[in-house]
Amino acid sequence: MAEPKLVSINEPSASLKQCSSPEWKAFLSLGFRPLYIAGASWALISLAIWVFMPQLIPSPWLGMAWHAHEMLWGFIATIAAAFLLTASATWTGFNPIKGKPLGWLCVLWVLARIGYLLPGHNAIVVAGALEVAFFGIAGIALARVMVKGKSLRNYGVPVLMIGLGCIANTLFLMAVLRQDYLGLMRQFNLGMLVMAILALLIARRVIPFFTMRMVPGLQLPMHTRTGHAQMVLGGLAVLLIAAGQNTLLAAVLAAISLIALWQWFAWKPMSVLHKPLLWILFLGYLFLALGLLYAAFLYSGLAQGAWARPAIHAHIIGIGGFCVLIIGMLTRTALGHLGYPIALDRSMLASYYLVLASFALRLGALWPSSLSLMLLHTATACWIGAFGLYLWRFLPRLIRPRADAAANR
């Protein structure tokens, strides 16, 4: 059976100008519109707080724990939810959530962000309940349309969403309340692995699909069977993290990574060097695979000294994998769903380079040296610049009707 299209995109043949006024109906018509704005905004705000204003992070949070939580659940998982709430309408023919329900869903997300910046255990409990409700409602909405549209092959998607946003998130927050640093790191790695499985699932479908649409005559394998193997191994890795079986976990992570690397090479990466909208996705997938391989190296016990820092694989997977994929997907899917030509302007391309620079500089800052603080601050500035450019270019578009629809009025 042929691989179905994950995202439906109409590609206008001519340049379109933004010619309509902001409109609530359009803004709340699909999940990506408000949640891309929310996630991208929080990406730059939360990192600025963590690096430049850590005094704003209240007790009982450990500063590092707040940063890890807000990057994974406040930003990365939120963008994943936004994408899935939009893509599932194409998979199934039914929009999972729109209008006032979508608006109230976003209110839950905003209140959770505020709650985590308030002091005291009760604030974390309330904010956590609101955030779990956000991901739970998103997961249920996805499950409803999967069943209604009989999209059997995607039944695992809402399960992953609920596992990441409700179960792993709750376990992480409980460890924060107990001030259990080791438990906190274990639950963070659990959440990051679930997100990695979700990212692999999405990327291995959209990357070849987008590539074949943008490079005429190019045919790429979808690797359905190895993708299934990757998902099964990912589920096993989750169980091994929970059981604390690090040696077996290292072997499974290495296998997941090697499958991803094999897929990446089979997708003919050299054929997309002239297409920034594609090479940014290829790079994100490559860094995700390499990050999982480094995690295998760490869990095997072979890493020693500075190489054994958990922050290394977390940042390779988190920034190099998730966030490089995200900046590419934020651009590519928004252009298509908003009715604009699938083409970058200078500001969009600059945001790609800034995210890549932030990734490189942040890895450099992890190595102990007299330059670490300067590299961290520079990486943060690049990060803020990247998502600031995205919002500057796309926020006015996300709050308006599709450009091609407005042009035909």
Image: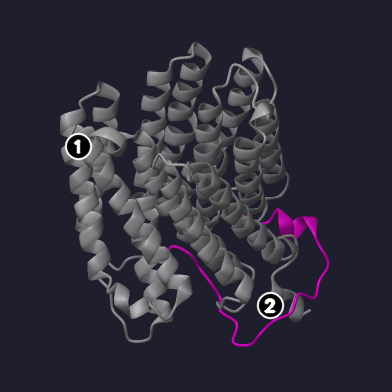
Magenta stretch encompasses residue 23:
yes
**Residue 95, percent from left and from top:** 58, 54
In the drawing, does residue 145 fall left or right of residue 259? right
Per the image, the residue denoted by label 1 is 250
Amino acid beneath label 1:
Ala
- Residue at (23%, 69%) from the top-left corner? 266
For the residues labelled 2 and 1, the Cα–Cα distance comes to 49 Å
Of the two numbered discs 2 and 1 on the same chain, state the one appearing first in sequence. Answer: 1
Dots 2, 1 in contact, CB < 8 A: no
Please tell me the numbered disc located at residue 35. none
Give the position of the N terminus as an image quadrant. Answer: bottom left
Residue 310 placement: quadrant: top left
Specify the farthest residue to the right: 21
**Residue 247, percent from left and from top:** 16, 31
Q: Callout 1 environment at 10 Å: few (<14), some (14 to 19), or many (20+)?
A: many
Residue toward you, 237 or 52: 52
- Residue at (63%, 58%) from the top-left corner? 385
Query: Please, what secondary structure does the residue beneath circle 1 have?
Result: helix
In the drawing, does residue 18 fall left or right of residue 13? right
Amino acid beneath label 2:
Asp
- Residue at (58%, 25%) from the top-left corner? 128
Please tell me the numbered disc located at residue 404. 2
- Could one spot residue 95 in this view of the protein? no
Query: Please, what secondary structure does the residue beneath circle 2 have?
Result: helix
Which residues lie in the magenta part?
6-30
